Amino acid sequence: MTAAPMTTPSMALGPTTAVALRRANGKRRRNNALIFVAEHSVAIALSIMFLAPIGFLLLTSFMSNDQQLTADMWPRTWHPENYANVFERTPLPSYLLNTVIYAVSATGLMLLASVPAAYALSKLKWRGRTSVFIAIICVMMLPPQVVTVPLYLMWANFGLTGSLWPLILPMLAGDAFSIFLLRQFLVTIPDEYLDAARVDGCGEWRALLKVVLPIAKPGIAAAAMFQFFYCWNDYYGPLLYTSENEGAWTLSLGLASFRSLHHVDWNLATAATMLTLIPVVILFFFAQKAFVQGVTLTGVKG
């Protein structure tokens, strides 16, 4: 007893019909691709616009010293050794460590102070709450350069200049933008949840820890990422307080070390820039869902 040979739909229809069917399927796929491009043309154009500078940096990082910043957009010869030269030219791991210490410590202290402040502004009833919130908004509008001189003199009297402490310790008082962002998110949490917790005997601190924090994770993640990215990219603060101590430099100051009086090694500078981008891109890739959700829900209810 022999098994009957298997036939595919294309074989059953005949060779001519099978070819026509394949052509129709290919045409349908092309039409679907064109429709997709047409429907998402604006998003595709914006993506190209935002990715083009990164592509330019990546290509420049593989160029030679003679080709950098010329009319050629594509490297004539590839020089991956530029990335190795970055580590020989500057102590990049030390700059990375200082940046991580600065960003993580400042973000942690900011959350420690800003979350309770936002909770008090959004969920507690007390006299002067609106005035304090307006004052926080006014602080957001205050340029940091206005208070640079008195703050620098204060930290110099404490003997903390030349280190990252003048940038980390102020986060114990919270951050105006983070308090505003978190407050706008916390007002979207129904008061009934907190009322039920209070009826069950929870105090305000326990209600904050057990009820509010689990619900507010997206908003907290958004505020933390904003603060982390700000610290990671901060140039003015480290330049002001750590410029005389290279051992406390961050990545932003380290990138400036590729600039001399009459010449800039742009191929090495762009290679160092690409290495600096990698950690924040990885962080955003893993936390983008919580970040987008937090930003989307913030401000739904005023």
Image (cartoon, helix red, strand yellow):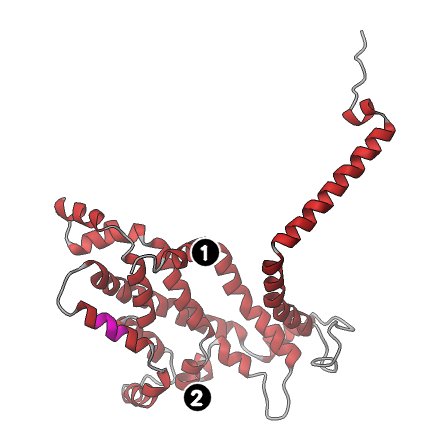
Judged left or right of residue 94, residue 127 is: left
Judged left or right of residue 167, residue 96 is: right
Residue 276, quarter of the rendered image:
bottom right
Residue nearest the viewer, comparing 188 with 102: 188
Where disc 1 sits, the SS reads helix
**255 magenta-colored:** no
Question: Measured from the top left, where is residue 117 in percent x and y?
Answer: 24, 65
Residue 70, quarter of the rendered image:
bottom right
Q: Which residues are magenta?
A: 132-136
The residue drawn where x is 37% and y is 63% is 223
Residue at the right extreme of this rendering: 16
Question: Measured from the top left, where is residue 17 in percent x and y?
Answer: 83, 29
Q: Amino acid at mark 1?
A: Ala
Where disc 2 sits, the SS reads loop
Question: Measured from the top left, where is residue 47 in percent x and y?
Answer: 60, 62
**Gap between marks 2 and 1 measured at Cα:** 35 Å
Marked residue nearer the N-terminal end (2 or 1): 2
Q: Which residue is mark 1?
A: 287
Eye-nearest disc, 2 or 1: 1
Q: Residues within 10 Å of mark 1 (few under 14, many from 20)?
A: some
The residue drawn where x is 66% and y is 77% is 267
Q: What's the magenta bit mostly, secondary-structure-wise?
A: helix
Judged left or right of residue 17, residue 25 is: left
Q: Residues within 10 Å of mark 2 (few under 14, many from 20)?
A: few
Residue nearest the viewer, comparing 113 with 289: 289
Q: Which residue is mark 2?
A: 244
The residue drawn where x is 32% and y is 58% is 185
Q: Amino acid at mark 2?
A: Glu
Residue nearest the viewer, comparing 17 with 247: 17
